[in-house]
Image (spheres, rainbow, N blue to C red):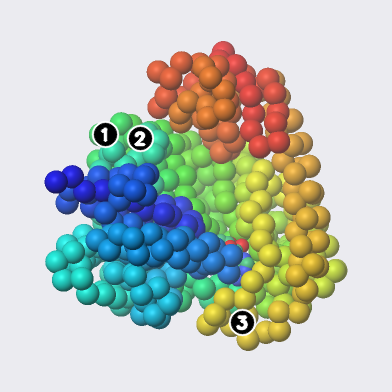
Amino acid sequence: MQRFVKIFTHGCQMNDLDSRKLYSELAGHGYQPTEDDRLADVMIVNTCSVRQKAQEKALSTLGRLCILKRGRPGLVIAVAGCVAQQEGEELAERFPEVDIILGTHQLHRLKDLVADVRSRRQLRVETAFGDAIPSMDIVPDKDFLIPPHRAYINIMQGCDNYCTYCIVPLVRGREISRDHGAILSEVRLHAERGVKEVFLLGQNVNSYAGGMTFPELLKEIHAVEGIERLRFTTSHPKDVSPALIECFALLPKLCSHLHLPFQAGSDRVLKAMNRNYTHDSYLRLIEDLRRARPDMAFSADVMVGFPGEGEQDFRLTLDLIEAVRFDVLYSFKYSPRPGTAAAALVDDVALPEKRARLSVLQSLQRRITLENNKARLGKIVEVLVDGPSPRHDHQVFGRTTHNVIVNFAGPSSLIGSTVAVKVTRANQNSLTGELT
Ligand code: 5AD
Ligand code: SF4
């Protein structure tokens, strides 16, 4: 009998990759992915707890599934990921319909646990941290690569930095690197399957230590035939070494884009966050990267309203944004996370003030993003075509090396290839162009 699974994914690219691995594993055990709630025999909520809002969203999805289950007792519900890791068994007290609670180091056990729960109907809680994370070595089947020419690859997990606001070290554990041999075999396998772009993932890729350094790993992957583009995330500014900067000068397949979260522009706040760099050293780093690769584009994460952030501190954040001219900024209101050092501080920036700062920051960034896009008018850009344009018939879309989305008229047969496109219109969050 055909069975179906549906996964609800919250959170980061790492969670997205984890969900694809889970789909792939379960597909090997007879569970076909479905979008349809009514068809699903197994439903999984892959959760995020990085901000309070992310956690609330995940729990609200879970609440909805639990209500569904009251009318369908055969349904298996699993909670995976960061909230599962953090809350463990307590989740089952709040949501008694849940069958499986699966921490971030235990994802590889899902398929066995589903079979077990189906036969014994007993709650399973698996949240131990190990010295290895076996799910890092699960390679999703090619049906689970979206788009099929881009492979996201885990190279490390966890974080040893202990930024004071951040729950990641608590829910993903200490840094664990995947062996470089396993990573390279995965890259080669994807290249044979026709993958063009490799996207390396880890909470802190710069401290990769799986038998070689991160810059060495980049060079090895760069040499794999068939791979045309290489990207990675996330980097910590304090760990961007001269050897990594040199990679941008030496490795043409390495895309001209770096996501480099700065979080705040005030040295006082950065110190309270335990970030280990300053406003000026961050700007120097950006300069060094632009010297290695003059057309380098940047994106970043930033938050407003960290405890003690005053008006003057916030101004310094705006100054930094003006100085770097990011293409994209992911900006958040600070929220205290349980168990972190900052949770012990008074959350003293009032919510309306946080909202006001966020709104000022976001309108500044909107202006810069549009100006950056306008500066690209008339240029010829190389676009790796990802798929049909979601909004326009007979158009396709893809990304430039700068990670900017370009829509243009063209046949779907272009998907997966890299084409030269002339930029004809600059929009707020994308470009429009024509094939040359
Ligand atoms: N409050 C608000 N934003 C946070 N982030 C991490 N922790 C918090 C928090 N407690 C943001 C940071 C990080 C991104 C993934 O989420 O900007 O880079
Ligand atoms: Fe969210 Fe961080 Fe966990 Fe990713 S690692 S799902 S961002 S808490």
**Closer to us: 7 or 327:** 7
Q: Dot 3: what SS?
A: helix
Q: Which residue in the protein does label 3 denote?
A: 343
Q: Position of residue 227 (x, y in %)?
A: 36, 35
Q: Is mark 2 within 8 Å of ligand 2?
A: no
Q: Which residue in the protein does label 1 denote?
A: 193
Q: Quadrant of residue 421?
A: top right
Type of the residue with mark 2? Pro
Type of the residue with mark 3? Ala
Q: Is residue 271 above or below residue 48?
A: below
Disc 3 residue crowd, few under 14, some 14–19, many 20+, Cα 10 Å:
some
Left or right relative to 406: residue 113: left
Of pointers 1 and 3, the one earlier in the residue sequence: 1
**Closer to us: 140 or 177:** 140
Q: Is residue 221 above or below residue 117?
A: above
Cα distance, mark 2 to mark 3?
Answer: 42 Å
Q: Residue at x 81, y 68 (%)?
A: 353
Q: Is residue 316 visible?
A: no
**Total number of numbered discs in the rendering:** 3
Left or right relative to 352: residue 48: left
